Amino acid sequence: MNQASNVGRTTMGREAFVQSVQKALGDGRLIVVSNREPCVHEKTSHGIRVTRPASGMVTGIEPIMRAAGGVWVAHGSGSADRLVVDAHDRVGVPEDNPAFVLRRVWLSRAEESKYYYGLANRSIWPLCHIAYARPEFSHDDWSTYKAVNRRFAEAVLDECRDKPAVVFVQDYHLALLPRMLREARPDLTIAQFWHIPWPNREAFRIFPWGEELLDGLLGNDLLGFHIQYHCMNFLSTIDRAIEARVDYERFRVFRGGRPTTIRAFPISVDFDQIGADSSLPLVDAHMSEFVSILGTTAELQKIFIGADRLDYTKGIPERFRAFDMLLRKHSELRGRVVLLQLGVPSRTHLTSYRDLNDELDDIVDDINWRHQSEDWQPIRFLREHHGYHAVLAAYRLALVALVTSLHDGMNLVAKEFVSTRTDGDGVLLLSEYTGASRELSGAVLVNPFDVEGMADSMYEALSLSEEERRERMSRMREQVGRNDSFRWGRKIFEEIARLKREPVTVA
Ligand code: F6P
């Protein structure tokens, strides 16, 4: 597709999305609410720095908020966040030419520790991912989770100002919020997107407050998951755990008379914007920086790249071990391949995340020690927050991008990588346990639990002819280009508009 038709498609996609939002809103306003904020203000020795967090949720939602406008309510977590808000805790985003308003909710350390690190990430996260990390449950975390959901509800209701609104809630941190809003304002339209997998009902049974959590979610008019399989899991969980009528024909649940519609909406990225940003001079500069860090170029050595939040669900130790196995099985590759791993530290207050970091250090040390030569080191592990343009640069340098999650709702790294490859080259090695694997038919699929199999797939990726690489990449670019973030948003808001037209049915 040439540049001109690209621009045409982007504009059309964005406009169609904005129209769908306007239709769904009528004379109401749009309020998005999430735990993670779309931009963080941090104090540094040179003043205030604004960063965009490494979050698939932010990657997916931010472009649609920029296009649709409205208010985004989120936890203000940055050290300089309070310095930039007005008297109502609001700040425009982006600050130089605001497209939407960010309303910050403040949490104490104790609240953050019990609600975010505790219930959300020590209980629900492992419960839903089933990546062999045992969920932990604490009554204290649960009561703080409830209290914090209440705090978000107050902020949202304040933003609604007794006017009609569509409230679009994000993720597993705010499962109780929809019911709280519904009780306070029965007239609101409430939708939620659950960005992580929903487990099967046997796995969910152990959650001690299952009934309350499910009841909270059934305060929504619409509840979205990435894939149909998670919708099915949710319906069968409801069937077993709570008094409600499940309509499997129409994917709806009736509890207390008002239906909640369950639908799959595979989230995506702003394909055209990422493609355009990838050729900025700033990205070229980052590419040169990586080249000098690696001491090599894409011409001299074949570059594998990984870019992840450092989370045990991402399969990073497995990826490193497979790379090690690749070098052991194919000694001719020594000195000819390199793995550049960008890792953003995440949730490091939790032991499981600190353990992961230690494990990664040990594995990288061991692999490098065993294979390296005077002028070659197989793995470069850069553990820090990398800005948006630096990540794009890494994707562009890669011959092979590695997405090896043990379980992932969607995984937007895979779609971002594909979006950057306007050159039509590059291979995506993708875990079959990501939502993205259901869409990206040009990827080389792997089972990250099978380390030797993954090493063989790495070899296969290296051995693909240029023609085959291009054919696969072109298929994936077509898939992501067609199903971009605006289409994702449009599908959700069309469904919201449809639900608003339907009379509220009592089962
Ligand atoms: O994948 C679920 C999710 O909440 C995403 O929405 C987000 O990308 C990621 O986890 C990051 O989590 P956190 O907000 O805890 O950094």
Image (cartoon, grey):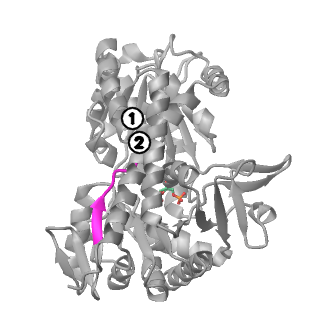
Question: Which quadrant would residue 428 be assigned to in this image?
Answer: top left
Residue on which the image places disc 1: 481
Residue on which the image places disc 2: 484
Residue 162, compared with residue 12, is above or below; it is below
Q: Nearer the viewer, residue 367 or 52?
A: 52
**Label 2: which secondary element:** loop
At a point 44% along the width and 77% down the height, the residue shown is 178
Spatial separation of the CA atoms under disc 2 and disc 1 = 6 Å
Question: Which quadrant would residue 226 be assigned to in this image?
Answer: bottom left
Residue 367 in the magenta stretch? The answer is: no
**Label 1: which secondary element:** helix
Kind of residue at disc 2: Asp
Residue extent of the magenta highlight: 261-267
Confirm or deny contact between disc 2 and disc 1 (CB under 8 A): yes
Kind of residue at disc 1: Gly
User: Is residue 268 visible to us here?
Assistant: no
At a point 55% along the width and 43% down the height, the residue shown is 343
